[in-house]
Image (cartoon, rainbow, N blue to C red):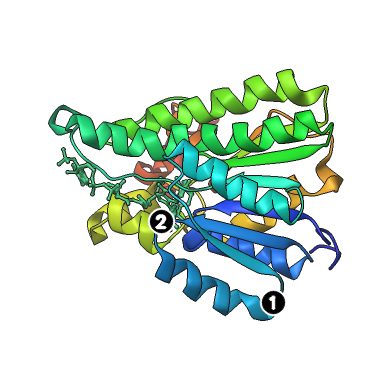
Amino acid sequence: MFQPDLLRDKRILITGGGTGLGKAMASRFLSLGAIIHICGRREDVLQKTSSELSAQGNIHAHVCDVRNLDAVEAMIDTIWKSGPLDILVNNAAGNFIARTEELSPRAFESVIGIVLLGTLHATMACGRRWLKASRSGTVLSISATYAPVGSAYVVPSAVSKAGVEALTRSLAVEWGNRGIRMNAIAPGPIPTQGAFSRVLPRPELEALALNRIPMHRFGTTEELANLAAFLVSDGASYINGEVIRMDGGEFLQGAGEFSNLGRVLSNEDWESLKPRKK
Ligand code: HXC
Ligand code: NAP
């Protein structure tokens, strides 16, 4: 799909890159020639991923909790010592389904801390360095389709992802004149252990999600990684401030007044609804 050197020598940090979508992006970016840094809280997970992917290229792992500003600054300092990053992917997240009225303050803080503050911490740490050195840079954040409209039962995530999208659009304008591009991807459900165990933890919930998607299948980590590779590449250099939805049409199916008619009306029903010939 891409030239094999699409991301040659691009230095990329993927937060939460030890698992799921982050790991898939790390693998794809490595195959396109990038130098990859991944971070997360669990050292064993990071080590396993980096030794698995090291056959594909140059990958470095950093234990870092993105909620902690000092830890993020220390990691970015360490990375910068070997050379500045070109691309930041804000992918780390926390989420779970719950009735909002039952959430404790720590439950809110935990998710908002990872998704919104973590994204802010990493974006500011890279952005300030790029601006100071008059370097260009690209930030890609992984949002979710419910960010612009909200969603019941994942409220801490919804408010955080909405903030991430606001940050993306705001800084696209404020920093765009200095060569920094800000974009986001809003994926629909893509099977990963981390996400599905927390937001679709039962077969009936998975079936419910599948039925909302016109293409009647979930997205794949490879599809997400391909879109991400395109968006961070120089080939997409005029795309700035965009949130690209990648959900097989799920969002639009939910929005359309008559989207579900196909489920209840049979061929015979459609025939009987045609105007009678006079
Ligand atoms: C209610 C919960 C809860 C749950 C945790 N808490 N899980 N409350 N229902 N299911 C509460 C805890 O009781 C605690 O509050 C507070 O949240 C913090 O929990 P900890 O376990 O101490 O926090 P921590 O170890 O930091 O873990 C963070 C986490 C966890 C977000 C809770 O799930 C995690 O580590 N997630 C990382 C990966 C992840 O979530 N991936 C999915 C991304 S999917 P108290 O008051 O008791 O101390 C996604 C989009 C999916 O984002 C969209 C699909 C279409
Ligand atoms: P995942 O495998 O659970 O990925 C989340 C990653 O974030 C993990 O590697 C986790 O590692 C890391 N992380 C969590 N808290 C962190 C912290 N405080 N500091 C640093 N790293 C942290 O889930 P995923 O499905 O790949 O999700 C990746 C992204 O896609 C997320 O932004 C998610 O919101 C988004 N998304 C996913 C789906 C989907 O269906 N899969 C749909 C829409 C959007 P540690 O636990 O080791 O820290």
Identify the residue under disc 1.
56
Q: Is residue 10 visible?
A: yes
* Residue beneath the point at 42% across and 30% down: 160
| Amino acid at dot 2 | Arg
Q: In which quadrant of the rendered image does the N terminus lie? A: bottom right
Callout 1: SS: helix
| Amino acid at dot 1 | Gln
Q: In which quadrant of the rendered image does the C terminus lie? A: top right
Picture coordinates of residue 102 (x, y %)? 13, 32
Cβ of mark 2 under 8 A from ligand 2: yes
Kindly indicate the quadrant of the structure image that contains residue 24: bottom right
Residue nearest the viewer, comparing 204 with 265: 204
Identify the residue under disc 2.
41
In the orientation shown, which residue stands out farthest toward the bottom? 55
Q: Residues within 10 Å of mark 2 (few under 14, many from 20)?
A: some
Picture coordinates of residue 197 (x, y %)? 29, 58
* Residue beneath the point at 38% across and 35% down: 113
